[in-house]
Image (cartoon, rainbow, N blue to C red):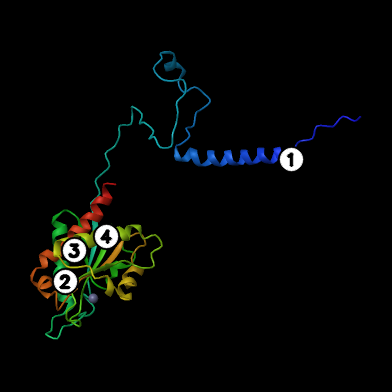
Amino acid sequence: MKRATPVADPRAVGVMSRTLVLLAFLVAFAVPLGLLPIIPAIPFSPATESEGKVPAFQVFSFNQPVSPTATAPPTNPTPTIPHVGIIAGHLGNDSGAVCPDGLQEVEVNKKIADLVVQKLLARGWRVELLQEFDKRLEGYQADALLSIHADSCTFPGKSGFKIARAESKYDPWAEDELVHCLTVNYQEQTGLAFDANTITYDMKRYHVYNEIHADTPAAIIETGFMLDDRDILTQHTAVVAQGIIEGLICFVESKATE
Ligand SMILES: [Zn+2]
């Protein structure tokens, strides 16, 4: 009778190699996430170890900041000054919408934009008042950019505002946050309703989005209709401006404290 030579069971080998691969994957993900600590093989400080003050092995984790050495005191980061750009819609280019009585959109936009700029400068922010086709918009970099427009007199009975960002943004997290901050605060200050139904392609494919730096979160606001919302737009401009200011503060200053 022949003795059977021991042959590796292919099933057992398969299971073992799968387990090893799985283990390698687990380690590859768990270590960067800090779920699994890295333990160096060499004792960290044998001298102090004998005094019984520190453990023999220092455990490093990616989530824990490296403690600064005694010779390098922690530096205070210099506070960053918020920086925004405000476009007075149509300024330097055309009148925008014109009402039958001669009221021009560009006048309404400019009055609101001026107030926003003035108040944010007073707050210590760095602010640029920009024209519709401003040369500075090419590669423009800031914490936020907002273009201020108003809706025409063409639709009697229409009231409300709208805010939109570029529809083509690959990762619109910041833009959505900007739109959210502006919408909530503008609505709260002005009492106007958000009019989602009349957001146009012009707003979502606004030319400025293609000119500015890709990292600058930008949005466009239609502050209200020049017929039914005329009173608040032209007589209570400070309220309108305050809604925009609060929205920008919500976005820029909350971002700075993250
Ligand atoms: Zn406009």
N-terminal of the two: label 2 or label 1? Answer: 1
How far apart in space, not on screen, are marks 3 and 1 (Cα)?
A: 69 Å
- Image marks 1 and 4: residues in contact by CB distance under 8 Å: no
Asked whether mark 1 and ligand 1 are closer than 8 Å, the reply comes as no
Disc 1 marks which amino acid? Pro
Q: Are marks 2 and 4 in contact (CB under 8 Å)?
A: no
Measuring from the top left, give residue 97's x and y in whole percent: 20, 81
Q: Which residue is mark 2?
A: 110
- Front tag of 2 and 1: 1
Can residue 14 be seen from the camera position used here?
A: yes
Q: Would you say the residues marked 3 and 1 are in contact, meaning their CB atoms lie under 8 Å apart?
A: no
- Which residue lies most toward the bottom here? 100
| Left or right, residue 65 beside residue 104 | right
Instruction: Give the mark nearest the N terminus, 1 or 4.
Output: 1
The residue sitting at 46% across, 36% down in the picture is 35
> Label 4: how many residues lie within 10 Å, few (<14), some (14-19) or many (20+)?
some
Per the image, label 4 sits on a secondary structure element best described as helix
Tell me the tag on residue 134.
none
Q: Which residue is mark 1?
A: 10
User: Quick one: label 1, few (<14), some, or many (20+) residues within 10 Å?
Assistant: few
Q: Answer with left or right where residue 48 lies relative to residue 5.
A: left
Q: Are marks 2 and 1 in contact (CB under 8 Å)?
A: no
Ligand 1 location (quadrant): bottom left
Which is closer to the viewer, label 3 or label 2?
3
Q: Few, some or many C-alpha atoms within 10 Å of disc 2 (few <14, some 14-19, many ≥20)?
A: many
Q: Is residue 73 above or below residue 254?
A: above
What residue sits right under mark 3 in the picture?
187
Q: CA distance from mark 3 to mark 4?
A: 11 Å
Q: Nearer the viewer, mark 3 or mark 1?
A: 1
Q: Residue at x 8, y 71 (%)?
A: 235
